[in-house]
Amino acid sequence: MKIAGIQKVTLLDFPGKVACTIFTQGCNFLCPFCQNSSLIDINKDGEISKEELFAYLNLRKKILDGVVITGGEPLIQKDIKNLLRAIKELGLLIKIDTNGSNPELLMEIIKENLVDYVAMDIKNTFDKYEKTIGKKTNLENIKKSIDILKKSKIDYEFRTTVSKELHSLEDIKEICTIVGKESKYYLQNFEDSPDVIDHSLHGFSHDELLLINKYLKESFPNVEIRALS
Ligand code: SF4
């Protein structure tokens, strides 16, 4: 288990909960808009031991509602289930952020009640997926993960980081069709930062996002723009 770091307390990452965020090291995608690109390298070691993590969680378990596990991609960590079990034994809720590339493990942790909330990225329409993640991937796995979440009884959301260069309005509408009217679906605007891989990308303007939201809402009432400032 490679833990790159923790954010001791967050009110933003787990909807309605006070949480600690755990960042895992390593990802199997190479998204040009990744805000955590220093966490992509699979060969890099973690910086925090499980002992250090659990010393903190034990100390703070009474003020925390839960833990968010993000990355990197948490579901490529070989011993992730042991981590989830140990967190559950503390009585904490668990949210996992995933890119959806490991549907078998996703199914297992849902069936074994090791997760309470899943946020899955849908990077783009399937036609544009590999361009958007910077790598080849098995699209069937992404489709299976979407299906697993839609059929599950746990709380979940889908989300897409949108940029002008990678996402047209028609692409976003097509992703809405993929996630369906019943699913919570969030659009997150691309923001440049030192950790981003491709600095030539641009987010949409405030007004453009409002127009996109208005257009989509007519058919997809559960679409929201996240963190529109
Ligand atoms: S899947 Fe997430 S962590 Fe991995 S490269 Fe893409 S944005 Fe970064």
Image: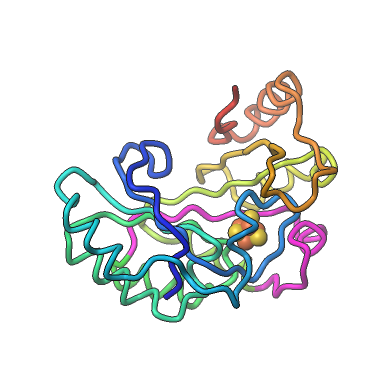
Can you say which quadrant of the picture contains the C terminus?
Answer: top right
Query: In this view of the protein, which residue sits in the foreground, 206 or 144?
Result: 206
The quarter of the rendering in which ligand 1 is drawn is bottom right
The stretch drawn in magenta includes residue 117? yes
Q: Quadrant of residue 95?
A: bottom left
Can you say which quadrant of the picture contains the N terminus?
Answer: bottom left
Note whether 223 is above or below 100 in the view shown. above
| Residue drawn at x 29%, y 65% as measured from the top left | 52
| Residue drawn at x 47%, y 63% as measured from the top left | 4
Query: In this view of the protein, which residue sits in the foreground, 203 or 219?
Result: 203
Magenta-colored span: 115-140
| Residue 28 falls left or right of residue 88 | right
Whole-percent x and y of residue 45?
51, 74
Instruction: Indicate the colouring scheme.
Output: rainbow
Whole-percent x and y of residue 51?
27, 70
Query: In this view of the protein, which residue sits in the foreground, 185 or 73?
Result: 73
| Residue drawn at x 66%, y 44% as measured from the top left | 161
Query: In this view of the protein, which residue sits in the foreground, 41 or 122?
Result: 41
Q: Quadrant of residue 165?
A: top right
Q: Quadrant of residue 186?
A: top right
Whole-percent x and y of residue 217?
63, 28
The stretch drawn in magenta includes residue 209? no
